[in-house]
Image: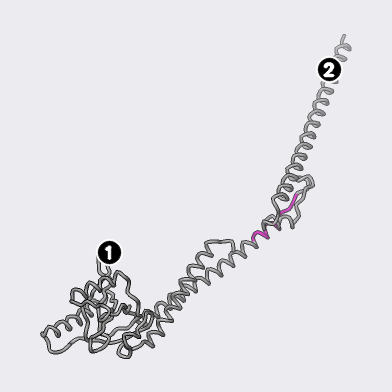
Amino acid sequence: MKNKNAWVGIGIFALVGIFMLFSGIKDYFGLKNATKVKDVKADQIKAGMMLSGETEIVWDYYCYETSDGNETYRWYLVPLDSTCTKFIGVKVHRKLFDSYEAVYASTADYYNGKTDRLTKKISYQGKVTKIKDEVKNNLNRYAKELGITNVDEFFLPYAIELKTTMSSVRSIVIGAVCIGLAILILILAIVGEKKDKQTEENTFAQIKVNPGWMNGYTINNDELSSLANGDLSAAEAKEDAEGLAADSEAMASEEFDAVQYAAENAEAEAEEAAEKVKDEIVADKIDVL
């Protein structure tokens, strides 16, 4: 395919589509079969696994991420079981800030003795990821403020990135659309290239070489086809061009000689006619005398 832009478009849409399609499918079935937090031990949790759970206890967020000066994500802490001896982070988008803040407020009221029971509950599900160094540093600082010296004893170095089956379906749809666009661009590029090739073939097939104008020099269809496809070597192309130029020059020279000869003949005839007229006038004068 000659059109490089078409290949670039096909590659981009194909790669993005394949990634999103398979990622979406993997997340969808992973969420459908997510492990319950209550059924797993802390040392069994690894990056990449899907976890789902429900909790009435949420500790305050220990880290946040901003965009254009606004908080976009927060890392809250939830317990792995009712004993609250191990916690894992939950990366929460700003759309859910209020929901997690409500559970955190209920938790704080309960532990501060303002209420005799926990009044809020929240469910979560998503993929376990290892937290980055910057996030880990914030977790260490948070633990220090709580008087906790052995961070790993209470907090796992992981966070649950919230996901929903709907977001997975959205990724699948977007991936399928991108792959479809890649296929469409490929089809259009192939059809366009075939049309261009057919147009070139038709154009060269219509070329008629005039022997009189070309002084007998001809270019056959094989040479024209080879020239169109770039198969003729530079030497062959140069030789053809020089031959054409030489024949054209010869033809022009012959035509010039013919014109010059006609002009000379015309001049001689004019002189002869003038002499004849002159002789007649002289003869008339003699007769008069």
Observer-nearest of 157 and 235: 157
How many residues crowd around disc 1 within 10 Å: few (fewer than 14), some, or many (20 or more)? Answer: few
On whether residue 202 falls in the magenta region, the answer is: yes
Residue 262, horizontal then vertical, whole percent: 80, 32
Query: Which residue has dot 2 on it?
Result: 278
Callout 1 amino acid: Asp
Residue bearing mark 1: 68
Residue 175 placement: quadrant:
bottom left
* Furthest residue in direction front, as rendered: 150
Taking the image as shown, residue 162 lies to the left or right of residue 261, namely: left
In the rendered structure, which amino acid carries the disc numbered 2?
Lys
The CA distance from mark 2 to mark 1 is: 109 Å
Give the left or right position of residue 234, taking residue 1 as reference. right
Residue 184 appears in the figure: yes
Where is residue 20 shown, x and y percent of the image? 43, 75
Q: SS class of the residue under badge 1?
A: loop
Q: Position of residue 277 (x, y in %)?
A: 83, 20
Sequence order check, earlier mark of 2 and 1: 1
The colour mode here is one colour
Secondary structure of the residue carrying numbered label 2: helix
| Main secondary structure along the magenta-highlighted residues | helix
The part of the image, by quadrant, that contains residue 67 is bottom left
| 185 sits to left or right of 82 | right
Q: Position of residue 16 (x, y in %)?
A: 45, 71
